[in-house]
Image (tube, rainbow, N blue to C red):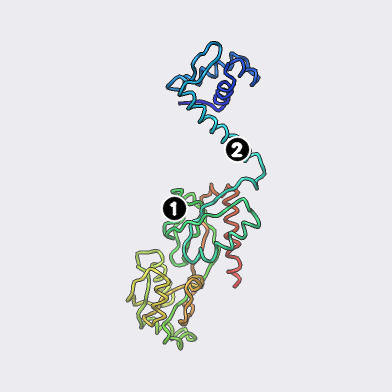
Amino acid sequence: MKWTFEQLKTFKVVAEGGTMTAAAEALGFTPGAVSQQMAALQAALPRPIFARDGRRVTLTDAGVTLLRHATTLLEDERKAAAALSGPQSDQRSVVTVGVFGSAAVSAMQPAIEHLRATAPHVAIQAAEVDVEHMPQAILSNQIEIALGLNYDDAPQPPLRGLVTEVLYREPFQMVLPPAAMRFTGDKRALVEYANAVDWILPPVETYYGRACRFACSRAGIEPRVQHIVTDTAVSISLAESGVGITLATPLMMGLRPSRSPVADLPGSSHRSIVAIARSSALERDSVLAVREALTQAFSPLALT
């Protein structure tokens, strides 16, 4: 079925006026033009919409059904036209942002506050996504922009059509058992200790697990992985209990503070929190506003 909004508008006026002549007068058309539009509309439909009643036209059951839906469609068209012709502040946009644990806790509230001050017509809808699947979630239109991760020692290959911007860089840190406090000020002794005790790391099959092992290698450490744990909070808790060493970053430690001694991992390995979006999405003012809000959310952290 193919019809136009112009035909539906004319149909509504005909139904309300009862004659083609009355509709023509109301619309400023000729009766012949109205008849042609109604003939074209009828040709696009499987059932008759008009029944003759002398000089007047009445609606069939199909016509009544069409009028009901046409009224809704025409009202929606009117509202859409009014919204798009009004000021940008009247055009509310919701942008879906893919987030993960530590980044969400650090960035969401500041980003929302920034948008309220600079672009109140734009709202964020956070959606938790496995950080390894952020690019695919964008490409499959599940989310519009994402907070993702990149590691110095395990960089992500670029994906066609996606733009990545670094928002924040932070170092890897070793979360040590309480008994290792005496090693925190001596890098050489710390490396020797780290090579001699058990470790708690994510599976090597994961992006973070590989990044951890590459970072350890850069530090001159071959971790003896005794416990394979994915959840960062659990890993930190195990280190705190004396089970072994794990890796974390300042943002992770903010999510799960610990009383354990913490030392920067030798070798200066970092991870980057990045904003990822389709290049085409960045042509939308709403998505650009959200990326700017996320950038501003991480700016104070970079200064600390």
**Of the residues shown, which amino acid type is indicated by label 1?**
Ala
Disc 2 residue crowd, few under 14, some 14–19, many 20+, Cα 10 Å: few
Q: Which residue has dot 1 on it?
A: 137
Residue tagged by mark 2? 79
Can you say which quadrant of the picture contains the N terminus?
Answer: top left
At mark 1, the secondary structure is helix
State which quarter of the image contains the C terminus: bottom right
Relative depth, front residue between 54 and 7:
54
Q: Secondary structure at mark 2?
A: helix
Q: Position of residue 271 (x, y in %)?
A: 49, 67
Of mark 1 and mark 2, the one earlier in the sequence is: 2
Farthest-out residue, left: 226
Task: State the image quarter where residue 72 is shown.
Answer: top right
**What type is the residue that disc 2 sits on?**
Lys
Question: x, y percentage for residue 73?
Answer: 54, 33
Question: Which x, y percent locates residue 19?
Answer: 58, 16
Q: Nearer the viewer, residue 58 or 212?
A: 58
Is residue 33 found left or right of 61 in the rendered image? right
* Lateral position of residue 246 relative to residue 75, left or right: left
Which quadrant of the view contains residue 131? bottom left
Asked whether residue 269 appears in the rendered view, the answer is no
Q: What residue is drawn where x is 47% and y is 76%?
A: 173
Query: Which residue is at 57% across, 63% downward?
Result: 109
